[in-house]
């Protein structure tokens, strides 16, 4: 890590309460658990990028506020999106477990963000005084990882489509289903969406333009509207 900050849990009471990992825990239980875990805290401004050093990769990262995207950087400089995490939501947790690949992990803040990193062993190895609290946090962590599994499955479905147009349609269908609406905002910029779908930016823009001309969708920045429901029944 390049910069870590002093973390005072009492200063982030609402953010901690809203994080799925601490769901159902009282303030005193949250503070006791964090005192035991001694997390590393870091803050990112919108657009800021940091790289995770190997010694910090096997950590549980909880995004308390903002939006953080994790990428794996290949030897050729190409990016693969690992996870996109918003604070104060069920996906406000991610764990870096890519040490064995010697992969460079890059974190990019889509908005001003604050996060903490915890050694998983602090939750997994029972402490006599905190066993009940640790159990509650582990149940919550399992729920978070279950949602992560669903998100990864959706990602694989998008990547498995044969061409750029079909990848976009599948992605927008999933977003429409989640929002239960034909009008919604996607969580990525155009560059981030291109990385998510593993396509180049020019091909993405061209296919989006074709879908708009064909009367299938309309969009303005991250706001999309489904005009033809042929591909979007939820």
Image (cartoon, helix red, strand yellow):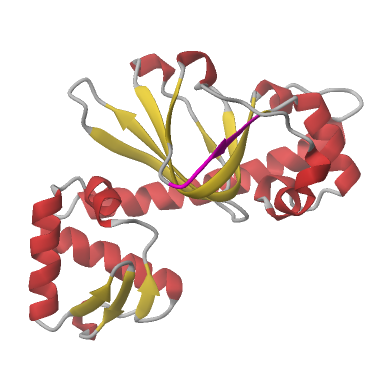
Spot occupied by residue 93 in the image (x, y as percentages of width and height)? 57, 42
Q: Position of residue 176 (x, y in %)?
A: 36, 73
Q: Is there any visible trace of residue 163 in the rendered image?
A: no
Q: Is residue 71 left or right of residue 41?
A: left
Q: Is residue 183 magenta?
A: no
Percent from the top left, x then y, of residue 132? Answer: 86, 36
Q: Residue at x 87, y 49 (%)?
A: 26
At 52% from the left and 14% from the top, the residue drawn is 55
Q: Does the magenta stretch mainly form a helix, a strand or a loop?
A: strand
Residue 137 sits in which quadrant?
top right
**225 shown above or below 46:** below
Q: Quadrant of residue 73?
A: top left
Task: State the residue at coordinates (73%, 48%).
Answer: 16
Q: Which residues are magenta?
A: 41-46
Residue 20 in view (yes/no) = yes
Quarter occupied by the C terminus: bottom left
Q: Nearer the viewer, residue 33 or 153?
A: 33
- Residue located at (54% from left, 43% from top): 145
Relative to 133, residue 233 above or below: below
Image spot of residue 49 (x, y percent): 41, 35
Could you tell whether 53 is left or right of 157 in the image?
Answer: right
Taking depth in this image into account, of 155 and 93 the one nearest to the observer is 93
């Amino acid at each position: 890590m390049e910069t870590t900050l002093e973390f005072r849990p009492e200063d982030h009471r609402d953010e901690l309460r809203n994080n799925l990992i601490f769901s159902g825990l009282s303030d005193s239980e949250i503070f006791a658990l964090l005192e035991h875990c001694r997390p590393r805290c870091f803050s990112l401004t919108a657009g800021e990028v940091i790289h995770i050093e190997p010694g910090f990769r096997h950590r549980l990262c909880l995004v308390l506020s903002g939006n953080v995207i994790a990428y794996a950087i290949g030897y050729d400089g190409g990016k693969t999106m690992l996870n996109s995490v918003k604070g104060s939501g069920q996906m406000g947790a991610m764990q870096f477990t890519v040490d064995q690949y010697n992969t460079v992990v890059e974190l990019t803040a889509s908005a001003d963000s604050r996060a903490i990193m915890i050694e998983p062993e602090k939750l997994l190895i029972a402490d006599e005084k905190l066993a009940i609290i640790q159990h509650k946090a582990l149940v919550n962590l399992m729920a978070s990882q279950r949602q992560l599994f669903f998100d990864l499955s959706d990602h694989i479905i998008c990547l498995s489509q044969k061409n750029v147009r079909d990848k976009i349609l599948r992605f927008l269908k999933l977003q429409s289903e989640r929002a239960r609406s034909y009008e919604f905002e996607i969580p990525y910029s155009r560059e981030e969406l291109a990385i998510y779908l593993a396509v180049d930016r020019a091909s993405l823009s061209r296919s989006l333009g074709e879908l708009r001309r064909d009367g299938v969708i309309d969009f303005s920045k991250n706001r999309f509207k489904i005009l033809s429901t042929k591909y979007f029944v939820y």
